[in-house]
């Protein structure tokens, strides 16, 4: 695609429910990143994919968070048993070259846990 | 712990003013420093700085890196209301993963 596409753009869920956030990166971009931005905060790294494997998942805050990537393309971030502190904007980014920093970001998913 | 700190956290100016945004960092294995502009949700890339003392310029925006003092500045001259945004500074580590460490951001509001 022309850009990084994320869905849904907004998600309101009840505490304790599971949610899935989707990221469709730019075609051909092998590196894919998930970041989280809480209100008034900078972006916090969650996980990095190179192809379908995740060499760095050090930013996942707890075992309720998991992510996968299939076909070297679409990625899904899953949050189980959501908590109110999970409320944030979840941003996905992709890049053609690993270690370049030259990401293209998606518009994010705003998750609100009530 | 790797850390990136931006100042000020927020700034209100009038059109035509010049602003300077600051970013300092303490990281292991520094590779590059990047500036992004975030207007709604998606940050858009502004500059990547790798070498000290070399100014990068794009229109009214410019940025420079000081690797000895571990900071960077982003200057915006003749500000316009369209410059209102959150400006994010991030450091790319030499970790072969492309992971960025972000500062908290500076919220700039330009009034007419």
Image (tube, coloured by chain):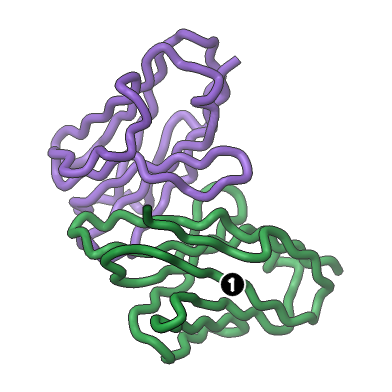
Which residue is denoted by mark 1 in the rendering? B22
Query: In the drawing, does residue A22 fall left or right of residue B47?
Result: left
Q: Is residue B47 left or right of residue A48?
A: right
Could you tell me which quadrant the C terminus of chain A lies in? top right
Q: Secondary structure at mark 1?
A: strand
Q: Position of residue A90 (x, y in %)?
A: 45, 37
**In the displayed structure, would residue B12 be above or below residue B39?**
below
Q: Residue at x 27, y 39 (%)?
A: A58
Q: Residues within 10 Å of mark 1 (few under 14, many from 20)?
A: some
Q: Count the marks: how many?
A: 1
Quarter of the rendering containing residue B6 = bottom right
Image spot of residue B57 (x, y percent) = 50, 86
Q: Residue at x 39, y 28 (%)?
A: A21
**Chain letter for the residue marked with disc 1 in the picture:** B
Foreground residue among B40 and B47? B47
Name above or below for residue A88 compared with residue A112. Answer: below
In the rendered image, the vertical position of residue A11 relative to residue A81, given as above or below:
below
Q: Is residue B23 left or right of residue A77?
A: right
Chain green in the figure, letter? B
Q: Position of residue B92 (x, y in %)?
A: 33, 63
Identify the chain drawn in purple. A
x and y percentages locating residue B65 in the rendered image: 45, 82
Looking at the image, which residue is at 55% across and 20% down? A84
Q: Residue, x 22% and y 30% (percent of image)?
A: A68
- Of A95 and A99, which appears nearest the observer? A99
Quadrant of the rendered image containing residue A10: top right
């Amino acid at each position: 695609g022309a850009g990084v596409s994320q869905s849904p753009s907004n998600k309101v869920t009840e505490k304790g429910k599971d949610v899935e956030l989707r990221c469709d990166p730019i075609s051909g971009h092998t590196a894919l990143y998930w970041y989280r931005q809480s209100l008034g905060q900078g972006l916090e790294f969650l996980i990095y994919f190179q192809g379908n494997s995740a060499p760095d998942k050090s930013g996942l805050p707890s075992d309720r968070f998991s992510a996968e990537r299939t076909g070297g393309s679409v990625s899904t971030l899953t949050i189980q048993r959501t908590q109110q502190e999970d409320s944030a904007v979840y941003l996905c980014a992709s890049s053609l070259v690993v270690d370049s920093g030259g990401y293209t970001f998606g518009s994010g998913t705003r998750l609100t846990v009530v | 712990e790797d850390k990136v700190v931006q100042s000020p956290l927020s700034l209100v100016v009038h059109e035509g003013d010049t602003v300077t945004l600051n970013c300092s960092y303490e990281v292991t294995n520094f590779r590059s420093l990047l500036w992004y502009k975030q207007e709604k949700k998606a940050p858009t890339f502004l500059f990547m700085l790798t070498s000290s003392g070399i100014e990068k310029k794009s229109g009214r925006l410019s940025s420079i890196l000081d690797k000895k003092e571990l900071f960077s500045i982003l200057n915006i001259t003749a500000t316009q209301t369209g410059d209102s945004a959150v400006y994010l500074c991030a450091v790319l580590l030499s970790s072969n993963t492309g992971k960025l460490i972000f500062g908290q951001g500076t919220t700039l509001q330009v009034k007419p």
